[in-house]
Amino acid sequence: MKAWRVHAWGEPESMRLDEIDVPAPGPGHVKIRNHAAALNFFDILQVQGKYQIKPPFPFTPGAEVAGVVDAVGDGVTSVRAGDRVMAMPHGGGFAEVSIAPESSVFAMPGAMSFEEAAAIPIVYHTSYFAFTHRTQLRRGEWLVVHAGASGVGMSAIQIGKALGARVIATAGSESKCAFAAAQGADQVLDYSDSNWVDRVKEFTGRGADVIYDPVGGDVFDLSTKCIAPEGRLLVIGFASGRIPSIAANRILLKNMSVVGVLWGGYVQSHPEYPARVHAALMEMCKAGEIRPSVGAKYPFSELPRGLRDLTDRKVMGKAVLTI
């Protein structure tokens, strides 16, 4: 089979499309013939050697796929050969075939495309985890979602609205603000304009109750100025490239909470958790409350271009590789 592999730390263009042996599923694992794989910002960091997880060379990145079950290992009972599924392999997604643990493989809704299904697992699970486990997002609260035109921002807007929040989304251009509004945001702000902090205060009257921040850097710093007393600032990631810090007295004076949201770390120690989240997300999907927007599709042979476009912030919604 063909698989994109990283042989040394570098840029997406340094990856190689190799011919390798087809893997076999071990006990408790599922072999999936991939039809689509979603691209994430952390894939780029992993190729560059900047991510906290550094697999041995050569390795295949990719953590969200959708396809058809080809075979199952001993003990697998929830899926069988021929089933259409979405899955979170532990790496290896940018390949014609992937192996995933049974606990990370889920049935696809019948009307959903492979591209849409590949766009769900990590970003929607992350946002659901953030709003229902790391904090309790309450109906009527003001929620600010940064990077509202990104895949993870898109999921946060949709799930936030489904949970009854009033959503303010920020994005970096007029077109991206329009995209965030289309996902259901009640208000949109261009955060290239530093006045967005004052606008949040104007909209809310007291500041945001919850702020969802996958950007970090200056956006995090400014978020601490428009969070409400007893607000919760959710740390999702650092797409800006700078990991921010905060003075403890600011946390004290506002009675605010700074909350880490590392979904992957939680799942490692709670492997049963994704199944519960998937069931809840599928109910939201049936109700029409969530639906991923695939903003860009790339042929399998053009993965480096897709990762480069993601790096250059050219994609709105999810970027997906078609296989």
Image (spheres, helix red, strand yellow):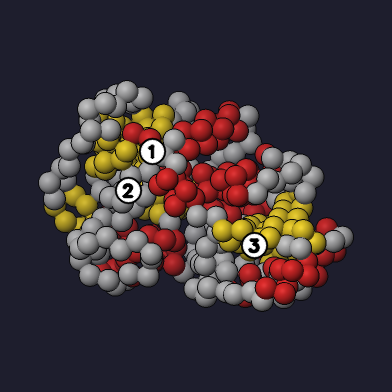
Q: Residue at horizontal 57%, vertical 69%?
A: 216
Between residue 297 and residue 192, name the one nearer to us: 192
Q: Which residue is mark 2?
A: 90
Q: Amino acid at mark 1?
A: Ser
Secondary structure, mark 1, is: helix
Q: Earlier in the sequence, mark 2 or mark 1?
A: 2
The reply to whether discs 2 and 1 touch (Cβ–Cβ < 8 Å) is yes
Q: Is residue 152 left or right of residue 18?
A: right
Q: How far separated are the C-alphas under marks 3 and 1?
A: 29 Å
Front position among marks 3 and 1: 3
Total marks in image: 3
Q: Earlier in the sequence, mark 3 or mark 1?
A: 1
Q: Residue at horizontal 67%, vertical 39%?
A: 162
Image: 172 above or below 210 = below
Q: Quadrant of residue 98?
A: top left
Q: How far separated are the C-alphas under marks 3 and 2?
A: 28 Å
Q: Residues within 10 Å of mark 3 (few under 14, many from 20)?
A: some
Image: 142 above or below 248 = above
Image quarter (top left, top right, bottom left or bottom right) of the N terminus: top left
Between residue 61 and residue 52, name the one nearer to us: 52
Secondary structure, mark 3, is: strand
Q: Residues within 10 Å of mark 1 (few under 14, many from 20)?
A: many
Secondary structure, mark 2, is: loop
Q: Amino acid at mark 2?
A: His
Image quarter (top left, top right, bottom left or bottom right) of the C terminus: top left
